[in-house]
Amino acid sequence: MISRKRLSSAWFPTTVLCAVLLLPGTAARAQQAPFAGMAGVWAGNGTITLEDGSSERIRCRATYAVSREGEGLNQSLVCASDSYKFDLRSNVAASNGALSGTWSEVSRNVGGNLEGRASAGHFNVVVSAPAFTATVSLTTRGNKQTVSITSQSQIKNATISLSRS
């Protein structure tokens, strides 16, 4: 079991990014309007790997509201494991393949910025906060999404698989 104390606030920006950038199922749509077809509820699970090499399963549920044009996304993500829970919110905008926005972890009152690129259903993003940076790679195929996160914090890696409910 992972103690709440061991989980630094650095984990929360990376998780936000996972949820924020879950994109629609087709590459053609992703190029025209990255968030088109994204609205609704997505759920799934994954694994986090800690600095000491131990790992734990995580369960997540995301709710997305997409702008009419498919260029803006408001997101809520709640994730939990056996030892902790967090509530993330984000606002993201897309413009010519570039992604930018803000995130916050509601219960811990922390937040920051995100920036990245979208291309043909694959997304590479950097999420940041004071003294923290993480990279996220996301691939969407149909109603399935795979997210890989790497950081230099107490949580070294995370992989999450989500499906549209």
Image (tube, rainbow, N blue to C red):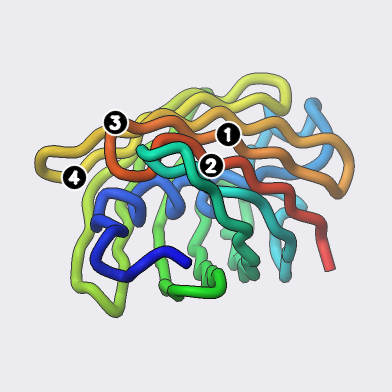
Is residue 163 rendered to the left or right of residue 119?
Answer: right
Asked if labels 2 and 1 touch by Cβ distance under 8 angstroms, the answer is yes
Which element type, helix, strand or loop, lies under badge 2?
A: strand
Residue at mark 4 to residue at mark 2: CA–CA distance? 18 Å
Where residue 138 is drawn, which disc sits there?
none
Name above or below for residue 35 compared with residue 96: below
Q: Which residue is mark 2?
A: 158
Q: Which residue is mark 1?
A: 148
Residue at mark 4 to residue at mark 1: CA–CA distance? 19 Å
Q: Mark 4 or 1 closer to N-term?
A: 4
Residue at mark 4 to residue at mark 3: CA–CA distance? 13 Å
User: Pointer 3: residues within 10 angstroms few (<14), some, or many (20+)?
Assistant: some
Q: Which residue is mark 3?
A: 152
Where residue 129 is drawn, which disc sits there?
4
Give the residue drawn at x 73%, y 48%: 161
Asked if labels 3 and 1 touch by Cβ distance under 8 angstroms, the answer is no
Give the residue drawn at x 66%, y 51%: 46
Name above or below for residue 130 compared with residue 115: below
User: Pointer 4: residues within 10 angstroms few (<14), some, or many (20+)?
Assistant: some
Q: Mark 1 or 2 closer to N-term?
A: 1
Q: Mark 2 or 3 closer to N-term?
A: 3
